Amino acid sequence: MKLEKVLEHLYLVGMACLFATIVGLMLAVIAYISKPSRKVILWVVDVLQTIPALALLGIIMIVFGPNGTTVIIGLMLYSLLPIVRNTYVGLQNIEPGIKEAALGMGMTKIQRLIEVELPLAFPMVFTGIRIAVVTSIGTAVFGAIVGGGGLGSIINRAILIQDMETLIEATLVLMAMAIIFDFGMGYVEKKLKTRN
Amino acid sequence: MIIYENITKKYDDVIIIDNLNLTINDGEFVVLIGPSGCGKTTTLKMINRLIKYNEGNIYIDDKNIKDVNAVELRRKIGYVIQQIGLFPNMTIEENISVVPKLLKWSKEKQIKRVKELLELVDLPYEENAKKYPNELSGGQQQRIGVLRALAAEPPIILMDEPFGALDPITRDSLQDELKTLQQKLHKTIIFVTHDMEEAVKLADKIVFMSDGKVLQAASPEEMLNKPAHPMISKFMGKLSYSRSGNDLTCEDVMKKKIFTVPETKKTLECIELMKQKELDTVIVVDANGKYKGIVTIEYIREYGKPGEMISKITKTDQPSVLINTNAKDAIDKLIELKCDYLVVLNRNKTVAGILTRTSITKALASVVWGEED
């Protein structure tokens, strides 16, 4: 039963971060290319982060009902900030000489993005994803309250029946997950950064 | 042929380029030069439409560049910049092939072209093609930068201070290579620099700009002989400082760090000082700093009495030369007299330095290899 809950937890986090990466990359690229939209996008992802997790999940539940979808959407909105910010900063910080060379050689906007700018920004993007994954592992615990399952449901029940042992066990598992992902992805990140 | 016709460029109300007219012939190596802010880089970047102009027209082979799609235009013009701008995420081969790939050359043709180009600068394909830019030195990176610009065989190459960030020796050899390449490939090259020496070395035609205007456009010889404006002579003036071995004086080749003692020093004090500085000879001067002679440690040991002033035992027959003596004559004197060094004196008889065989060798090396000051 335990393993099942761990996998369920990972599924929620994984799906949320996958969607957050797709949406986040698109938003960051739009913010990078179009100046008028830049402020709005960066402001919105900032504000999303300031809404308390419980409140955000509650609001989404009104629309999608108490289930996994609600949790995934909530976590995704939460994960947007690190991914959008890091992608945007990564694109912005590419050496001007490299951008000028790409432009001067006759690459179109899309070619510059896909062949030069996004690959060069990727280590930064990856850092954003790592932050999103690690924080989501913790935040997903709240998902149990809106019926999302995962390790949160075990913790909830353990609190209700005052089962200290289960509570500590679940917490340790959560911590272990966060640390494993943080280190594992941190290692990949280091590899990515040394190449550029 | 590239023709600038009445080109004017303004930022707000500030005029950057003022009614520029300029013709660049096919196969010509044109160097744009001038003080910072004279508009030389702006002039260059107008050709591939990285910078827009407000008035006038630019024609490349009778085609107004405004009527050509900017992306298409740029693919037909090579572009090399000071920051090099190789793509760190691509191998050397991929970097060179960027424009051929954009032009949809076949894979085989791309590889063949990369091999050909790397051979041109003596970088073997097998060793270098799969490397990433950060594995190469700055000079090698800019070699690749130049090859990347040549890759799709554009008739025109724009170079914006391409060697400005390199060390003097590397810069020199890249200049030589570029000149050889140009003679082999007959490209039209437009090259921006603020270094007159570089301009004279590379250019068929130098275009001197100031405040958005062309002050003179002429061959290097003509510009050296008949500068059309005082500012050009000033720029050229820097060149006369770069000397050949013939007009070096003692001042250029002498050792300036020397140690002098006043003639009133006592013998024991003097020995103590020499021990500290690890010297076996010092130059003796009087109260006004004028040259008196030398003392050596053996001399003091042999003739010196404790408590005596060194003026009593100073050797006054050490040969000396004046600071503006031609270095060649001084070297001849040094060899002829079979001494270890000459004392170099200023006109007022104060000591300027000494001339040793080592200092001469060093100075000559700097003439041969070049020196940045």
Image (cartoon, coloured by chain):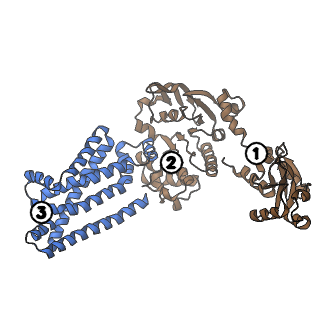
Nearer the camera: disc 1 or disc 3:
3
Between B245 and A171, the one lying in front of the other is A171
Q: Residues within 10 Å of mark 3 (few under 14, many from 20)?
A: many
Disc 1 residue crowd, few under 14, some 14–19, many 20+, Cα 10 Å: few
Disc 1 to disc 2, how far (Cα)? Answer: 32 Å
Q: Quadrant of residue B347?
A: top right
Q: Is residue B23 left or right of residue B292?
A: left
Of marks 1 and 2, which one's residue comes earlier in the chain?
2
The spot of residue B210 in percent (x, y) is 58, 29
Quarter in which the N terminus of chain B is drawn: top right
The label number, if any, that marks residue B84 in the structure image: 2
Q: How far from the left and from the top, in percent, is residue B249?
A: 80, 45
Kind of residue at badge 1: Ser
The x and y percentages for residue B268 are: 83, 64
CA neighbours of label 2 inside 10 A, class few (<14), some (14 to 19), many (20+): many
Question: Label 2, label 3: how many angstroms apart (C-alpha)?
Answer: 54 Å
Q: Do the residues marked 1 and 2 share a common chain?
A: yes
Q: From the viewer's perspective, tell me whether residue B77 is left or right of residue B181.
A: left
Q: Which chain is brown?
A: B
Q: Residue at x 79, y 65 (%)?
A: B272
Specify the amino acid type for callout 3: Ala
Task: Give the residue pinned by disc 3.
Answer: A144
- Say which amino acid is labelled 2: Ile
Q: Which of B202 and B281 lies nearest the eye of the viewer?
A: B281
Q: Mark 3 and mark 2 in contact (Cβ < 8 Å)?
A: no
Q: Which mark is residue B244?
A: 1
Q: Is residue B250 visible?
A: yes
Alpha carbon distance from label 1 to label 3: 84 Å
Q: Position of residue B12 (x, y in %)?
A: 43, 26
* Figure colour of chain A: blue
